[in-house]
Amino acid sequence: MPSLRIAIARAIDKSRSNAWIKSMAMNFTTAKSGSLDHQIPEERVDCLVVGAGVVGIAVARELALKGREVLVVESAPTFGTGTSSRNSEVVHAGIYYPRNSLKARFCVRGRKLLYDYCSEHGVPHKQIGKFIVATENADVQKLNAFLSRGIENGVEGLRMIEGFEAMRMEPELQCSKALLSPVTGIVDTHSLMLSLVGEAESYRTNFSYNTTVIGGHVEGNCIHIHVSDTKKLENCMEGCDQLQPELVLIPNLTINSTGLSATTIARRIDGICSGTIPSSYYARGCYFTLSNTSISPFNHLIYPVPEDGGIGVHVTLDLDGRVKFGPNVEWIGDIDDVSKFLNKFDYSVNVDLAQKFYSEIRRYYPNLKDGSLEPGYAGIRQSFAVLDSPPLILSYRWEEIHGVQGIVNLFGIESPGLTSSLAIAEHVASRYA
């Protein structure tokens, strides 16, 4: 009996000779169940995880550990090429998030699980701590509020310190007060994902890369997931009037963990109530790296008081001691569905942003020299809040909410998604394994 991955590959190869995908028109729509070609092969699976970012991989591993047969499909050639590889690689403490929110609960629980996992599996990480710094009087009140919130969330070891004490610990720092979080750290995200993938595969999880979910439909109380070969979609970038699948998967359980395209995929599943899918916005966050130095000016992570839409241009260290600053927040326009599926967002870093970075960073690092910043990389964040609107933060949609049995939509997996990944996986598996 061939593995699920081989079965999917064979089904896609077999169907490539058929003219499923047509060109022209910029408005992409998924074919409804009634218009599907009856020659499209179908494959039944137990658990389908859509998206091989760190959260999807963690969910797949946890379900497999509980005895479920799991298939992971990913549009990219390998795992973790999206948001999971374009972030600060910080293990967050759980300070910023409202009490009893999913972000607070998953971050605190996930941090503990993540540190334990990394220690047990030899994943490089370091609990280096962080300062949230006040550089003006108005910031001090906000620091006090974060201290109270962090304690309510169960964050250990938080301590408010005077500026002179913080600057004694970090001589290059300038601040009037600081909130010290000793449990914050950094992790090698790629090594973490590699370990999770290996463990999932050892429990018979199959990964199918270059395999894109383009929508689905509900038929006979079962969800049918429409799958296409990524290369076919790339050839369709100039426009298609309809996207026809090359394979239909019929899972007992589907986990939509596609990050930036999670809401788009949910909207393209005929049968899910659109009112249960939140509107989303996209923001690009750029990073600059510190050049012309082999020694980091800081031993801790340094964060300013958060700004609207983000947590401010902060100092992050990687495990090799390299220093990066970011991210900023640039709200960007929407893109078409296929571009989302294929992660065709604009990840360029505008060199002209450096001047704004210099002014932001010098608020707490006044000795930053001209010409020392180089463009690094950018990430894209999907948010359900823009500017001053109330946030709809990390959420999941069970069948009781969206009315379709056997699918869980994971929405809003932005920061602290990396830190929360194992806790999210634990939570999903506790219900379905």
Image (cartoon, rainbow, N blue to C red):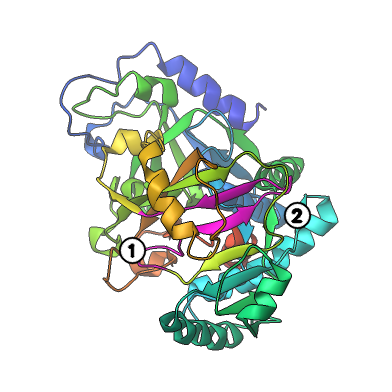
As rendered, which of 388 and 253 lies closer to the eye?
388
Asked if residue 166 lies left or right of residue 177, the reply is right
Residue 34 in view of the camera: yes
Q: Secondary structure at mark 1?
A: loop
Mark 1, mark 2: which one is toward the viewer?
A: 2
As rendered, which of 89 and 412 lies closer to the eye?
89
Please report contact status of discs 1 and 2: CB closer than 8 Å, yes or no.
no
Residue stretch rendered in magenta on the structure: 307-329
x and y percent of residue 378 in the render?
46, 42
Return the residue at label 1. 403
Residue 99 in view of the camera: no
x and y percent of residue 372 in the render?
55, 42
x and y percent of residue 340 in the render?
35, 39
Task: Categorize mark 1 by other alpha carbons within 10 Å: few (<14), some (14-19), many (20+).
Answer: some
What residue type is disc 2 on?
His
Q: Residue at x 24, y 45 (%)?
A: 333
Q: Quadrant of the C terminus?
A: bottom right
135 within the magenta span = no
